[in-house]
Image: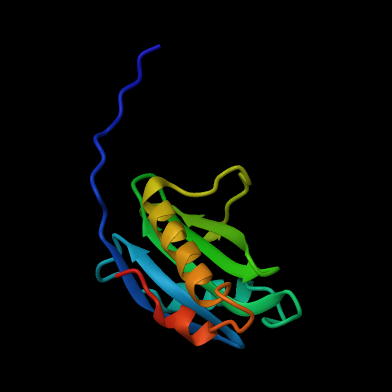
Amino acid sequence: MEYRFTPYKKRNVSFLNVMKHGDWKMKVYGINLEDTPRDKILYYLGEQLPTPACTEVRYGLGFLIIHRGVEANWFLLNWWSNEDIVRQKLYASSVDNFNAIKPVEDQNVLACVHELDIYSFESEAWKRHVLRDENPDFEGYLKDILD
């Protein structure tokens, strides 16, 4: 079997803002998202977060990746729980209808290499600010962004 791959080309990753939805605070990153309207999407995804935001094992903090991909638009909704666990809900829309977002049924999908760069950064930021000692610095985590 012969495989052919498209040569890797870095995509434009940008920090967009900190989304606040109820008691949730989510860092929002975009990949190839230049000039894409997002307000409706952010509200919809905020509604998908578990409630309450803050419990003994959930901190109301996480990150969202919105990726205009080649085969689909991807929306990776991630939040921290149980000290060092990332939980995820994955959504997608077709490339020709950005706002027609729906849950991804294939639970085997995690992320592509472009999204994994953000996961790596967020993991290190969580360790730096939250898991560093007995006193987590949640505000420091929110300010530590990949840019």
Residue extending farthest right: 56
Image coordinates for residue 93, horizontal then vertical, percent: 46, 56
Image coordinates for residue 37, horizontal then vertical, percent: 34, 74
Image coordinates for residue 44, horizontal then vertical, percent: 54, 74
User: Quick check: 32 above or below 40?
Assistant: above
Confirm whether residue 98 shows in the render.
no
Residue at (56, 76) in percent of width and height:
130
Confirm whether residue 93 shows in the render.
yes
* Total number of numbered discs in the rendering: 0
Q: Nearer the viewer, residue 108 or 96?
A: 108
Residue extending farthest top: 1
Colour pattern: rainbow
Residue at (54, 58) in percent of width and height:
91
Residue 61's image quarter?
A: bottom right
Q: Tell me the quarter of the image containing the N terminus.
A: top left
Q: Nearer the viewer, residue 108 or 136?
A: 136
Q: Nearer the viewer, residue 97 or 54?
A: 54
Residue at (61, 76) in percent of width and height:
47
Q: Tell me the quarter of the image containing the C terminus.
A: bottom left
Q: Nearer the viewer, residue 129 or 94?
A: 129
Residue 118's image quarter?
A: bottom left
User: Quick check: 42 above or below 12?
Assistant: below
Residue at (44, 57) in percent of width and height:
120
Residue 50's image quarter?
A: bottom right
